[in-house]
Image (cartoon, helix red, strand yellow):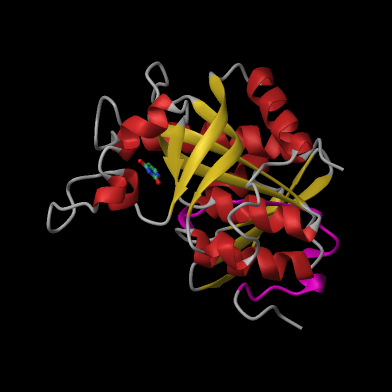
């Protein structure tokens, strides 16, 4: 039977254990095709969930998009867990907040601040959103292998791109008090970056007894710029996908 939203069955993915999870459906084929022209095939597409299967070093890896944000990611992770996926690697883009983190660098998250609503449906707020040691380790080794500058640490996962990440170009220009000054606060607390999915992924994988991790390519440093340079995004996507695929081959 096909899963409700992702429209995949166990037969479609045939015992694959590891899934790479970009947010953007358009990145699925780009990432899977890094395995080589004859080593990937497109599977299904429904709503924000596009999927492809690829093989790297004889290891099958599923690539499936989750859409933006924790609610749709949670749907994908639920359905993938039912199909037997044990390792989940989010492959994303991010806005860095610490000085010295440059566009093009990678961030491997060890944990995520839970500025989301979804993870609270799985565990109380006192439960930590932490990545799995094995996946963090595999991602860091892979970044080192490809000699890509990377940073390891805590990420903020926000439900919103605008107020939760303290962007003042909201429609009204107003941000509620809770988030005014929040970027400076996270900086002081040594948080590395903002993104929108990892906290739900980490909590869900932990409570399911499965493994997860995140690698994100930096497209902007918020201390210096508000808007990314689009010409940079392609390079960042490719390097992030390459690092994630290599890491996926090292997991049990
Ligand atoms: N993704 C985010 O959530 N924030 C950014 O600044 C860039 C990418």
Q: Is residue 93 visible?
A: yes
Residue shown at 47% from the left, 31% from the top: 191
Would you say residue 225 sits in the magenta stretch? no
On the image, which quarter does residue 73 sit in?
bottom right
Q: Residue furthest left?
A: 172
Assign ligand 1 to one image quadrant. Answer: top left
| Extreme-bottom residue of the structure | 1
Q: Residue at x 49, y 67 (%)?
A: 48
Instruction: Indicate the position of residue 67 as horizontal and vertical percent values.
Output: 48, 61
Q: Is residue 67 left or right of residue 3?
A: left
Say which of 2 and 154 sits in front. 154
Counting from the top left corner in percent of width and height, residue 243 is at 63, 32
Quadrant location, the C terminus? top right
Tell me if residue 223 comes above or below residue 19 in the rendering. above
Is 162 on the left or on the right of 97, as rendered? Answer: left
Residue 55 horizontal/vertical position (percent): 76, 47
Q: Is residue 32 above or below residue 94?
A: below
21 relative position to 172: left or right: right
Specify the segment rendered in magenta.
6-26
Q: Please state the horizontal and vertical placement of residue 219, each as a whole percent of the image.
A: 38, 34
Residue placed at 62% from the left, 72% from the top?
A: 6
Looking at the image, which is closer to me, 82 or 203? 203
* Residue 13 is inside the magenta segment: yes
Q: Residue at x 79, y 53 (%)?
A: 210
- Depth check, front residue: 249 or 166: 166
**Res 162 visible:** no
Could you tell me which quadrant the N terminus lies in? Answer: bottom right
């Amino acid at each position: 039977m096909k899963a409700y939203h992702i429209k995949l069955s166990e037969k479609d993915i045939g015992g694959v254990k590891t899934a790479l999870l970009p947010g953007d459906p358009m990145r699925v084929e780009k990432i899977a095709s890094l395995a080589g022209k004859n080593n990937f095939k497109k599977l299904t597409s429904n709503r924000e969930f596009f999927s492809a299967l690829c093989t790297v070093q004889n290891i099958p890896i599923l690539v499936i998009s989750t859409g933006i944000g924790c609610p749709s990611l949670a749907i994908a992770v639920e359905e993938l867990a039912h199909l037997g996926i044990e390792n989940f690697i989010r492959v994303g883009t991010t806005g860095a907040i610490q000085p010295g983190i440059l566009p093009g660098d990678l961030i491997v998250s060890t944990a995520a601040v839970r500025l989301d609503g979804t993870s609270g449906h799985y565990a109380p707020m006192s439960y930590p959103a932490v990545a799995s040691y094995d996946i963090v380790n595999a991602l860091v080794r892979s970044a080192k292998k490809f000699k890509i500058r990377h940073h390891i640490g805590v990420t903020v996962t926000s439900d919103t791109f605008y107020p939760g990440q303290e962007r003042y170009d909201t429609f009204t220009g107003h941000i509620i008090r809770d988030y005014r000054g929040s970027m400076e606060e996270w900086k002081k607390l040594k948080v590395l970056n903002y993104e929108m999915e990892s906290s739900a992924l980490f909590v869900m994988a932990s409570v399911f007894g499965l493994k997860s991790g995140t690698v994100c390519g930096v497209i902007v440093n918020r201390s210096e710029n508000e808007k990314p340079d689009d010409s940079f995004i392609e390079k960042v996507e490719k390097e992030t996908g390459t690092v994630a695929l290599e890491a996926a081959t090292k997991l049990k």
